[in-house]
Image (cartoon, rainbow, N blue to C red):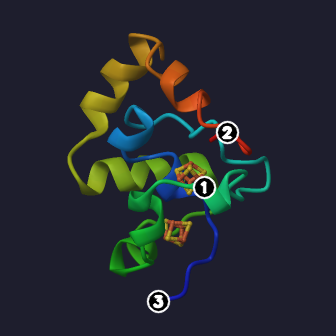
Amino acid sequence: MECTRCGACCVAPDIAALDKPLGLRCPHLTEDNLCSVYERRPQVCRSYEADEVCRRIEAPTLEERVRKYLDLFGLAAEAEAVSQGGCGSMRAARKLRPGDA
Ligand code: SF4
Ligand code: SF4
């Protein structure tokens, strides 16, 4: 399976290395779904490879792909709770900027 750069894996999962909560867009994901810190992205992002999940979540919009991803892993309710609770923990993710040591 080839990566189509659909962006869903930078939005749907929680990413501990970035303190990125479930279902919220990584602050480093650009409008056209590219990684703005590609050279410095965490190891977890480096190791991520397109697989069967990518095919199973195919949909016309990013929002739908993210919803399908969360449904697939039974995480929709948890993601909903995160979105209700705000995204204070995204502050840590935003600290990772291009050019930082
Ligand atoms: S979910 Fe899969 S196809 Fe979409 S960007 Fe991530 S690896 Fe690529
Ligand atoms: S750091 Fe880059 S590759 Fe990792 S989740 Fe954010 S945008 Fe995606």
Pointer 1 residue:
40
Q: CA–CA distance between discs 2 and 1? A: 9 Å
Residue type at mark 1? Arg
Of the two numbered discs 1 and 3 on the same chain, state the one appearing first in sequence. 3
Q: Under 8 Å from ligand 1: the CB of mark 3? A: yes
In percent of width and height, residue 86 lies at: 46, 12
Labels 2 and 1 touching (C-beta < 8 A): yes
Q: How many marks?
A: 3
Q: Earlier in the sequence, mark 2 or mark 3?
A: 3
Q: Is residue 59 above or below residue 91?
A: below
Q: Which residue is mark 2?
A: 100
Q: The residue tagged with tag 1: helix, strand or loop?
A: helix
- Helix, strand or loop at label 3? It is loop
- Between label 1 and label 3, give the one nearer the viewer: 1
* Residue 38 in sight in this render: yes
Q: Residue at x 56, y 64 (%)?
A: 59
Residue 50: image quadrant is bottom left
Where residue 81 appears, as percent x and y from the top left, is 31, 19
| Location of residue 99 with respect to 84 vertically, above or below | below
